[in-house]
Amino acid sequence: MKTASPYLLPGADPDALIREARRRQRRRYLTAGLVIVLVLAAATGLSVGLRGHTGRVSHSPQRPRRAPASGHLTTAVALSGQPRFFADVIETDEGNGTLEIRASATGKLVADDGQAFSHNVNGLTATGPGNFLLAQQVGDQCASQLYQVRLNGQGDPGAPTPVGPELHGEVASLAASGGLIGYAVTGCSKGEPGYIGVMDTRTGFSRRWSDVDVLGISPGNVAVTGSLSMSANGRWLAFAGWDTTASGHVTRQVVRVLPVTAAAGTVAGRSRVVLSRPVTAPALDAVSLSPDGTSVYTCNTAGSEISVARYQTATGALLANLARLGGAVKFPPAGCQMTLDTTGQYLLLAYLLNPARGSAWTAVRVASISVATGRTTPLTINLGQSGMDPVSGMNLAW
């Protein structure tokens, strides 16, 4: 599926290359989705202590903007044990938005931290209730900085605190447990491999695993298509992705688990496949590891239906089907995007909805799911009018 991968020419714009990679990644989802639809039709006869992004990050303790009272959403009942707030970043093909804070019970926008992070927050994860880690590009460089943000009791973000050294490349995904942080990072040219890395902000330990395709920009025989997840005990990383040939042809959908203490090497060589499916099977969009790493939750899309299931990490055996979500799902979006709260009790997932006929609003459905009972609490958030840069997803953390 990939073309040849020449190195970035002197003077070329890395940001433009990454924007094109985002478009290409969406097209790859579209191609895979069409293959699934055609095959089904033929078969049935039916039709983490933390630092940045583009532009400079303000380190002044400015108070973030409070959200306006108006909004278009459906309300939901708050569930006991859920975090009060979740953080999100709106994704588009041209780049990502700023950090937003919403009430978990209603989805209401509580704060927009555009003063500190004007746009392009590229990675986002939670390190505890009201504590978040995110990544931004460093100026115009092909480098990223991680930042820690803490909320007060009203959901307002405090001043961002840089964490760790700058990372070479664009951080596409983050996962964390305490001071241990995992990240998936692109290369800075079409010919430079991406990598998955970890660093411990308490001890200084760090490690990288190479030869991974991130955002469709980096060559590698494993592609990361979903966000990273780290078990709360800090022992494992997991991700949904594709196994590919040297030429970039996708051979299988996979869920891989990587021990944080694995020796340096390639991602393919050091990780283990937990689930493997044909490309034509329902898409494995996102995964979240249980706190002890013994099971993994998956979010799968097929047509207009999304399903959430739990599998045993050691064997890949199905443990439970937790939820099925339907409706006017936009297919294929960036896929289902999912995260487990830091207590390990609730999953939070987001997916796009088709706008109503004649409507210019872009809607995102956010649903919380109890991992104990499968109880699902959905709500719909209307983000505003779609235009030349339509919404392609919502990155979540809580």
Image (cartoon, rainbow, N blue to C red):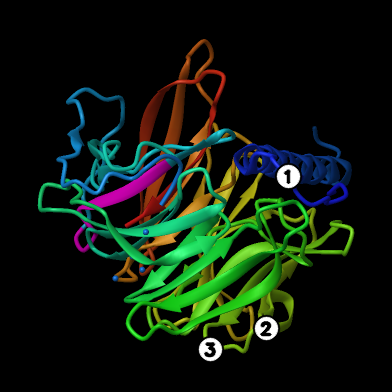
Q: Is residue 98 magenta?
A: no
Query: Marks 1 and 3: CB-CB under 8 Å?
Result: no
CB atoms of marks 3 and 2 within 8 Å: no
- Asked if residue 372 is positioned above or below residue 375 in the image, the reply reads below
Q: Residue furthest left?
A: 153
Residue 137's disc number: none
Q: Earlier in the sequence, mark 3 or mark 2?
A: 3
* Gap between marks 1 and 3 measured at Cα: 37 Å
251 to 17, vertically: above or below: below
The residue at which mark 3 appears reads as: 261
Q: Secondary structure at mark 1?
A: loop
Find residue 10 and name its label: 1
- Residue at figure coordinates x 51%, y 43% from the top left: 140
Question: Horizontally, is 387 left or right of 202 in the view?
Answer: right
Which dot marks residue 270? 2
Residue 170 screen position, x and y as percent: 55, 54
Classify residue 253 by image quadrant: bottom right
Amino acid type at image mark 2: Arg
The answer to whether residue 389 is visible is: yes
Structural crowding at the residue carrying mark 3, measured as other residues with C-alpha within 10 Å and reported as few (<14), some (14–19) or many (≥20): few
Label 1 vs 2, first from the N-terminus: 1
The answer to whether 88 appears left or right of 350 in the picture is left
Mark in front: 1 vs 3: 1
Disc 3 residue type (three-letter): Thr
Compute the Cα span from label 1 to label 2.
34 Å
- Boundaries of the magenta span: 80-89
Choose between 312 and 268: the one closer to the eye. Answer: 268
